[in-house]
Amino acid sequence: MDVNQPLSLLAGLTPAQFMRRHWQKKPLLVRQAISGYQPFLSRTALTKLASREEVESRLIVQQDTGWTLKKGPLAPRSLPPLGQQGWTLLVQGVDLHEPAGHALLQQFRFVPDVRMDDLMISFATPGGGVGPHFDSYDVFLFQASGRRRWKIGKQKDFSLQPGVPLKILQNFEADEEFVLEAGDMLYLPPRYAHDGIAEASIGPDGKHADCMTYSIGFRCPVQGELTADLLHRLAEMGEDAAQLCGEENQGARAVPKRMYRDPAQTATETPAAMPIGLADFARQAVLDALNDSLALTCALGESMSEPKPGIWFDEAEQAWDGEAAKAGQTGIALDARTRMLYDSDHLFINGESYRAKGADAALMQRLANQRHLAASDLRKASKSAIALLGDWHEAGWLMQHEDTLAGQG
């Protein structure tokens, strides 16, 4: 993507200008971000998707008695009638199940993939919404059809209403108000309070238009959670390295593990007290692990490329044809569920890491950036790279095609 090319998606700004002026800083209202857009899922198709076991969905209803929340799977017959006002159906991760949803997210890849989360679709009857709230992450709110009124504000008081199954702000104060029509979009930075209410709308065909809002959300790693995951991964790497070292030294003089020693320990009258020396030993062990920059970046890449819980891959329907790939007769495309990243030393894919250098690394980085490779690209791959791609194909992480399918994956 040319980050210096003005986009109607960003109100005529270039991606570079948007990131510099708005990203994590201030909202942006875009009229007709995608003009003439047609939703890729009908209301019926969306409710069918919400009924599937592997799809995360929620039903939110606001009545005089208060709010109710029901988590999916949601059978279509369990939804309120369309004539009932004030209810909302939310379906998460639509990009993992609908190719058109995955394709829509590609328009936002001026933000690093490591930050991309998913596409959520909200269908609401007039008066429907989820209450005034804030998100801890950046979000683009695209009005795919119908109309929704948004009130937004730079909230100072983040206290929540008690006894409510949703995180609804108790003292919401709006600074601005917009009505988004089909094709309009609103970007909001993290912790920017907002309240969106569906309104009745007539479409170009003169018929009632469903209020459907597409939320393009982004990941925001939480420091404590990330720390715990990285330390766990670093510990596993240390165990793997020790095991490998032991296997390589079989028959030779064993390399001892670094273990806590206390030859200066005196007799104690307080046996339950933790020795200071043990705390020092533990502190040094953690510092040593963190000082290994290569291991730390490797653990980070594995963590950031790990698919969400509940995501699994289907085995390939056809066997990998390595000879055809090497001969330049087939192209490949990553599965929509695959998360592939890289740094200067590693490739990361679905929570696994590989050391990579040279021409093969450049080729794999191109695959990660484009999410597909042409047949002519694969002709340049080494035998080991072709074999690795075959392993990923067998795992269901990528697909092999006879033709180059640019833009897919």
Image (cartoon, rainbow, N blue to C red):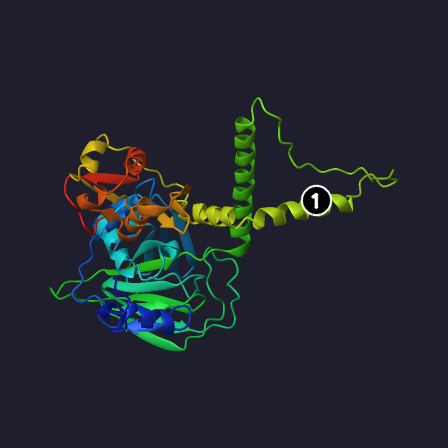
Residue 339 visible somewhere in the drawing: no
Q: Position of residue 121 (x, y in %)?
A: 30, 55
Instruction: Work out whether 320 lies above or below 43.
Output: above
Q: Position of residue 275 (x, y in %)?
A: 78, 44
For the residue pair 207 and 18, the one nearer the viewer reads as: 18
> Residue at the location (49% across, 67% down)?
170
The kind of residue on which mark 1 rests is: Phe
Q: Position of residue 147 (x, y in %)?
A: 25, 67
Residue 233 visible somewhere in the drawing: yes
Q: Position of residue 301 (x, y in %)?
A: 44, 48
> Residue at the location (62% across, 31% down)?
255
Indicate left or right for 167 with 89 as reference: right
The image quadrant that residue 330 belongs to is top left
Instruction: Work out whether 409 lies above or below 186.
Output: above
Task: Classify mark 1: residues with Cα within 10 Å, few (<14), some (14-19) or many (20+).
Answer: some
Farthest residue to the left: give it. Answer: 205
Residue corresponding to mark 1? 281
Secondary structure category for the residue under label 1: helix
For the residue pair 233 and 187, the one nearer the viewer reads as: 233
For the residue pair 187 and 241, the one nearer the viewer reads as: 241
Indicate left or right for 292 with 397 as reference: right
> Residue at the location (85% across, 41% down)?
270
Farthest residue to the front: give it. Answer: 252
Indicate left or right for 281 with 116 as reference: right
Farthest residue to the bottom: give it. Answer: 175
For the residue pair 112 and 176, the one nearer the viewer reads as: 112
Instruction: Report the number of numbered marks.
Output: 1
Farthest residue to the top: give it. Answer: 251
